[in-house]
Each structure stands twice: as structure tokens, then as C-alpha cells.
Image (tube, rainbow, N blue to C red):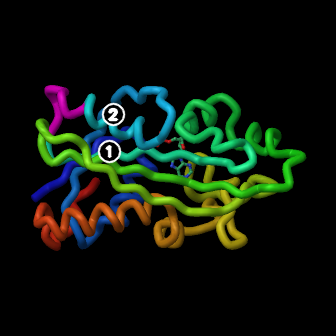
Amino acid sequence: MTIYFISSNPQKVKEIKELTAGRIAIQHINHEYPELQLDTIEEVARASANHIRHMKWVKTPFFIEDSGLLIHALNGFPGPFSAFVFDKIGNEGILKLMADIKDRRAVFKTVIAFCSGVNEEPRLFTGIVEGRIADSIRGSGGFGYDPIFEYEGRTFAEMSTEEKNRVSHRGRAFMEFLNHVEDSGIAVGASSGAR
Ligand code: IMP
């Protein structure tokens, strides 16, 4: 069975294509949808999936994913506001906010919201990775906050997609999700049709 992934972010599609290859058949639907400003990434993902499942254009089963960066010393900011903050101040702005802060601990989180049918409430799968905010922008790979998120000495932007996927928030959320769809028989060992 094909599972539809709804996103307008080509970099996420690239990572997800690699993460699901050989395990489930997914098809990308390039469609925008409203992202509400809510208190947690989980609530944002759930609200988006609930919105989408009532749209005429939806195909099921489908999933979306919402991610964010949570900085310990800033009480979890930007968290659910990660996209807005990235657009407004970017990585330079985050480094300025962190200029005099010694505690650089940060977490990346991905929440996948999966709907098996239009009448089904979304089911959530979460992945996190703990790292730190780098002292400067480093690396040319990845996207978004990758050049300032350091994991075991390297920023995500200094890793290949395969290396990032092995340890990332998205990679971990997908392991949970893939186990669920395989165990429940929704998808059985199909090869990836993502494009
Ligand atoms: P969203 O999940 O598309 O809402 O992403 C929120 C913000 O976090 C956007 O600015 C993304 O570019 C950024 N972002 C999402 N996933 C990642 C990632 O894996 N690495 C770096 N930045 C990310």
C-alpha cells in the first residue's frame, strides 16, 4: 500500500526518501497547508493533520511531519515557532541571542502525524536528538538550523544525509513510524516510490 507524505519542503522529502527506501512505498504530495501557532510541536502536527484530512485533495493513508529546535537556555525557544524565527532572524540571529550564554544544550524534535483514513484521528510518532548550539555557522549540507546544530563535534550541515539520518530527530521519529506501519500490516516491505 502507498502512504502519502504531504509537504512543500524538498529537503525534508530528500531525507524521508532515504529514510523509507526499501521499507515502505511512499508518494510525495507537494501541497501547502496552514501551520497554526500552538504551544507545542505535537499540537501543531496534530492540528495540521486534522485540517488536511478534511481537505478534498487528500489521499489516505497520509502523514505530515513538523519539526523544531528547542534551546535549553532559552526555555525551549524557538520550539513550535522555529519556522517563523528562522525566517525572521536565521542562524545568525540565533547565534547573537546565544552570544553570552555558556549553556549551549539544544534538542531537535520531529513529530510525525499519521492518518490512516479521513475519519481517523492522527497518530503521533516523536523523535528527538540532543546536541548543542555551535559557536559559529559551519557546513554546507542540510537545511534550516543544520549549520548551527552540533552533534558529537560536527554540525548536521557537516554530515551527509545518510550520517544525519542515522542520528537525527527525523531519523528517530521515522524508526518509530516505520515499525508501526510494518507491524500493523499497513505497509509490508515495499520499496520506496518517493519522488
Ligand atoms: P517545519 O517542520 O517545516 O515547521 O520546520 C520548522 C523550522 O525548523 C524551519 O525553519 C525548518 O527549516 C527547520 N527545520 C526543520 N527540520 C530541520 C532539520 O532537520 N534541520 C534543520 N532545520 C530544520
State left or right for residue 134 relative to residue 80: right
Which residue matches tag 1? 64
> Residue 176's x, y, as percent?
33, 65
Q: Residue furthest right?
A: 100
Is the distance from the Cβ of mark 2 to the nearest ligand 1 atom less than 8 Å?
no
Taking the magenta stretch, the answer to whether it contains residue 2 is no
Residues at circles 1 and 2 in contact by the CB criterion of under 8 Å: yes
| Vertical comparison of 106 with 153: above or below | above
Q: What secondary structure is found at the residue carrying circle 1?
A: strand
**For residue 183, which numbered disc appears in the image?**
none
Of 195 and 48, which appears nearest the observer? 48
Question: Label 2: which residue?
Answer: 48
Q: Earlier in the sequence, mark 1 or mark 2?
A: 2
How far across and how far down the image is residue 45, in percent?
Answer: 37, 40
Q: Quadrant of the N terminus?
A: bottom left
Q: Which amino acid does the dot numbered 1 rest on?
A: Ile
Magenta residues, start to end: 52-59
| Ligand 1 lies under 8 Å from the Cβ of mark 1 | no
Q: Quadrant of residue 87?
A: top right
Q: Residue 84 placed where, x, y %?
A: 57, 30
What residue lies at 33% left-to-right and 38% top-to-bottom? 46
Residue 53 highlighted magenta (yes or no): yes
Amino acid type, label 2:
Ser
Residue located at (48% from left, 72% from top): 166
Q: Quadrant of residue 19?
A: bottom left
- Residue situated in front as seen by the camera: 25 or 125: 125
**Residue, x 78% and y 45% (percent of image)?**
95
Q: From the top left corner, tell me how far across and down residue 13 is, in percent.
A: 37, 52
